[in-house]
Image: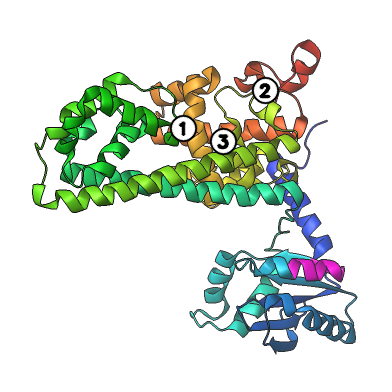
Amino acid sequence: MSNATGLTRGDRRRNERRARLRTLVPASGAVVGIDLGEDRQMLVVCDHDSQVLARKVISAKAAGLGPALDWAVQRAEAAGFTSVTVACEPTGSRWMHLQDLTAERELTYVCVQPLATHRAREEEDYTRDKSDYKDAVLIARLTAELRCYVPESCEGDWAMLRHLGRRRAELIDRSSVATLQLRDLLALAWPAVLAAAARPTESKTWLAALAVVVERCDGEPARLRRLGLARFTDAVRRELPFWDGSKVCHRIAQAVFVCLADTDGAVTRQRRGALQRAGWALTDLRTASLHRRTVEADMVAVLDALGLTVSLTGIPGLSAAAAAQILAEAGDPTRYASARSLVKHAGLNPAENTSATFRGRARTSKRGRPGLRLAAWRAAWAVIQHNPVLAARYAHLTGREHNRLTRGQAQVACAAALLRWIHAVATTGRPWDPRIAAGELNHTTAVTTGPVAA
């Protein structure tokens, strides 16, 4: 059947989304806008023309807003409204308290993006005048205009996965900080040891050898020369299990031993203090790595409980920990209307810049969830190395003659493709198929002709 209206798929999905929001924010209902604070909450009851019917200041935590919500419902009913929609900005974790309170009272609950409120503040009266009361009115106005969204209700294993993902992200940041600090301090006090391995901070033997040296040398690595290579290697072997290693790389251990007396490029007057700080950075790195392994094991266990480990790790190059990190930030993939919605949530979708005959440069929107964008970016790099489909896509994007992308732009495109794969695999329950991923086969055809896929 022809499309007589000329509507695109995007138009239809937008219409459906706004229709769903209109059922949550009916024109016959009042809107309760709440500006959440630490110990002081501002609440206003408005109609759909943003006229304030009542307002109230509550000196309480967000968890104590129950009586205020009951008061707001009474004021709305007294004004002749048949329903109430409660709206706020997702401030810290306070909005979750309000979410539970509205659920207990069977009230509709939506959120307004803080960026939308910020921009509406200037649209209101062309100033930057700001107060809790004005912000509450703006929140109510934006809700009536359907410039709001239904917040995620994260429960059970998904809530656990979210917190584990946040912890893993913190530990990765701590490891990165410790690694950069370690390299900086060694470049100051003992540059020679950085050349003992091709990728020193990724070598377990190098890390174990460095731990042995900084613990015993008291600012003078040459003192450990008296141990001899054999005893030094034995000390490294005993240290190795603390770095989750089992076998010494003798080439690296010998290289570290050889450079014990090498002072080329070192600022000797800073050596003792710098090596002590290097030891502390090394301890931070080891602790963060140990905790990260524990957290990742817990995340994989949650992924197993959700029944997604086998299907997601069926994507070559995607580890269970990386998949769990992406889902920790994204939440349940089934809550997204399409794979494109998940990509937009990550801020990895291209943002157009066109007008009439003008064709500007499209850029990544970066208007989504930063944690999800970072998790997809990190995971994509490993998948590109081990997945022939994504590797071919990356090579095509960076090697084509027309509209060639930089390596960073190509990795963004690959990260978006990875999110689409994850959405398809998680929502359909069918395994990943390289033919569909490469665009050689339609997914509906694959169901009848061969192995099904995402």
- Residue 92 in the image: x percent, y percent? 60, 67
Residue at disc 1, secondary structure: loop
Earlier in the chain: of badge 3 and badge 2, it is: 3
114 vs 167, nearest the viewer = 167
**CB under 8 Å between callouts 3 and 2?**
no
Residue at disc 2, secondary structure: loop
Q: Report the residue marked by disc 3.
A: 322
Q: Quadrant of residue 429?
A: top right
Q: Quadrant of residue 19?
A: bottom right
The three-letter amino acid code for the residue at tag 3 is: Ala
- Residue 412 in the image: x percent, y percent? 48, 37
Q: In the drawing, does residue 281 fall left or right of residue 255?
A: right
Quadrant of the image containing the N terminus: top right
Which one is closest to the eye, mark 1 or mark 2? 1
Name which residue lies at 68% across and 31% down. Answer: 309
Find residue 432 and name its label: 2
Location of residue 435 with respect to 268 vertically, above or below: above
Residue furthest top in the image = 449
- The range drawn in magenta is 98-108
134 vs 180, nearest the viewer = 180
- Residue 400 in the image: x percent, y percent? 41, 22
Q: Report the residue marked by disc 1.
A: 244
Earlier in the chain: of badge 1 and badge 3, it is: 1
Q: Main secondary structure of the magenta part?
A: helix
- Residue 101 in the image: x percent, y percent? 79, 71
Q: Quadrant of residue 286?
A: top left
Does the magenta segment cover residue 101? yes
Residue at disc 3, secondary structure: helix
The three-letter amino acid code for the residue at tag 2 is: Trp
Name which residue lies at 48% across and 25% down. Answer: 384
